[in-house]
Amino acid sequence: MLRPLTLLTSLKLRTLFPTLTVLSVLSASPSLSASPSLPAPAASALQPFSPSALSSPLPAAAQPPLELVFETKTSADNAIIPASTRAIRTLGFHKIGSGPALYVYSGTEPPAHTPRGGRKTTRPATHYITAKSEDTGVALHYTLSEETPDVLQFGAIADATSEGRSTQTPGKPAHDNTAAFNDALACGKGAHVPAGRYWIAGTIRILADGSSLHGQGPGGAGQGGAELIFGPGAADCIQVGDGENQLRWAKITRLALSPKLRAGGNAIFAHFNYQLTLSELRINSPYNGIRLFRGIGFMLRDIVMSGIRAGDGDASGPREIGYGIKFSGAPALYDKNTGAETKRNTHVLYLENISFGGARHETDPANWTVGLWCAENAASVNGATVKNQNVRHGVYISRAAAVDAGDTLLVPEGYRLMPPARTDAKGKTHRHGSAQYPHEPGAVINDNRPFQDLTLFYLGGDFLGGEYIYNESGSGVAIHNPHFMRTYQGNTVYMGAAAKDMSIHGGQVIGAFKHGFDMNGERWHINGVQIYRHSLDTAGRRAHAGKYSAIHVGATSVGGDIANCKIGNEPPGTTARAGSTVRFGVDIEKGARGTWIHGNRFHGCLEANINNKSGAELQTEGNLMGPVEK
């Protein structure tokens, strides 16, 4: 949209670039319209300075004007502009009417600018007109005044079909808009994407603090929205951050992303971000969805993701785990005086109204697609309303085997990197932090150990999918007030033998396909949960009757607590009460140690409220036992 060049614009430019000379002639410039159909300005206003005029010295009366006006940025780029010129105005970028383009003289060096809340940076030289006068050879730099330009201003063309063919030239490939999007974003404030369907053959990169990539809406081109069709290859579709410098306050919103032609990569990969916002997105058929790696503070809301294609294996295990959102790699914190590692509690993820869907059916044994994957991170997931369909696990919690060797190690300012172990003269290896190899002030340890310190969930909403919570090896996992419903494949909550310190507080488990809870790890706690009505329909309940228990305690379990829960079946008088299907309220395998049951209410278990094979380790003091229905 073309905007009038007013005195306010002049003052704003003075604020951004205090050293610039912005002449009063700018404030007197005529108003410009975005529509190319409007009458053109007077010929005298449009007449650019002729390069041929520089072939001979000009008399004093014929000195070039202080302001030059060109039809497009391209014509200004191609002109030879005398050193005495102080301002350039164009009527568009690639064509007349494609947006405002005010360029202001800034001296012989590109000006630094400060993005919103960010540090001073220098825009790339490609976003300046660099002119040389024939007599002095002095470079003149002009800077773009627009804060969030339109991608059309940089040559983007919305001419793509869903398969990347051109709608304007049948039989030809669509115009590749990768460079146009990146050029617009490199200006430092982000870019707007008008309605239409755009072909992107490469990777869109958001690298400047405060940048926003925002579209007309997530409805897709057919519904008046902005849709990005990503071409073949295995690269990420959108990369947020360079992985070396922390990127702050970036935002991607109101877009439809279609990466179905990609054979790998993520729809969005955020690398070392601070307070990233992703909202109002529709992501169709990604290989993987969104990867959040080594960042601090993420907000994701109103995202619909369908047809995740990654994730492969068989009934015995995965060869690859695909994901809707993967949340991993929280940076370690180090004491500024000693260099000793402190708590890893820097990850915060807020989820609201997130829906995942896999390309395969959730009961397909080759489907190893998960909705939200928390791996080797310190995570706090707050306010999550998550729906999942056709994914094997709704929330998958694991430790990484190791941090990828190629990952950039983040070294805070004033620290130095050092190895995690040192070999002495006798060939003995000592780990950093031991008595033989003590902590050193300012040291950041290059340690590739896996870790999982804390994962905290506040979950809400319905779940439709295979298994809801699958905690393979997470440590310190707390889940508050979940609303569990309709699991089509396995246990509603599974805790593996390698997992430790897991607790679930409040919520409901309705219609578990197998066990409501299958607990096999160390130190777990279930409190105030309602667990009833196994299976989803009448036929399913008949088939599952007597096979699964509300809570199953495996032989490897150590130190589990079950307190103040409602377990079994709805009591008599409940509206739409289902037939009894739960075999045992609590089924404890031989070998389990230290299971404590207190204050629970049991009803409608087919065989018994409690089946304890572990012996005297069970304590049942204070239980209120309901009748056993046959």
Image (cartoon, rainbow, N blue to C red):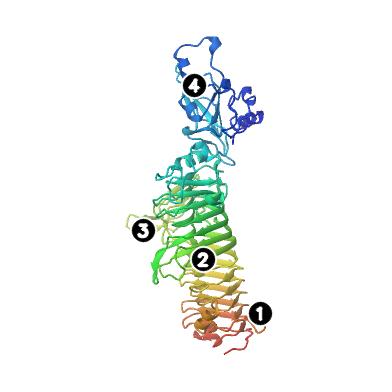
Q: Is residue 624 left or right of residue 424?
A: right
Q: Nearer the viewer, mark 3 or mark 2?
A: 2
Q: Position of residue 47 (x, y in %)?
A: 54, 21
The answer to whether the residues at label 1 and label 3 have Cβ atoms under 8 Å apart is no
Q: CA distance from mark 4 to mark 2?
A: 61 Å
Secondary structure of the residue carrying tag 1 is: loop
Q: CA distance from mark 1 to mark 3?
A: 67 Å
Quarter of the image for the C terminus: give it. bottom right
Q: Nearer the viewer, mark 4 or mark 3?
A: 4
Secondary structure of the residue carrying tag 3 is: strand
Q: Position of residue 394 (x, y in %)?
A: 51, 66
The answer to whether the residues at label 3 and label 2 have Cβ atoms under 8 Å apart is no
Q: CA distance from mark 1 to mark 2?
A: 27 Å
Instruction: Name the amino acid type tagged 4.
Output: Ile
The residue under label 1 is 575
The residue under label 3 is 429
- Which residue corresponds to the image point at 54% horizontal and 68% vertical from the top-left? 464
The residue under label 2 is 389
Q: CA distance from mark 4 to mark 1?
A: 83 Å
Instruction: Name the amino acid type tagged 3.
Output: Thr
Quarter-wise, where is residue 604 in the image?
Answer: bottom right
The residue under label 4 is 81
Closer to the chain start, of discs 4 and 1, is 4
Q: CA distance from mark 4 to mark 3?
A: 67 Å
- Which residue corresponds to the image point at 59% horizontal and 61% vertical from the top-left? 384
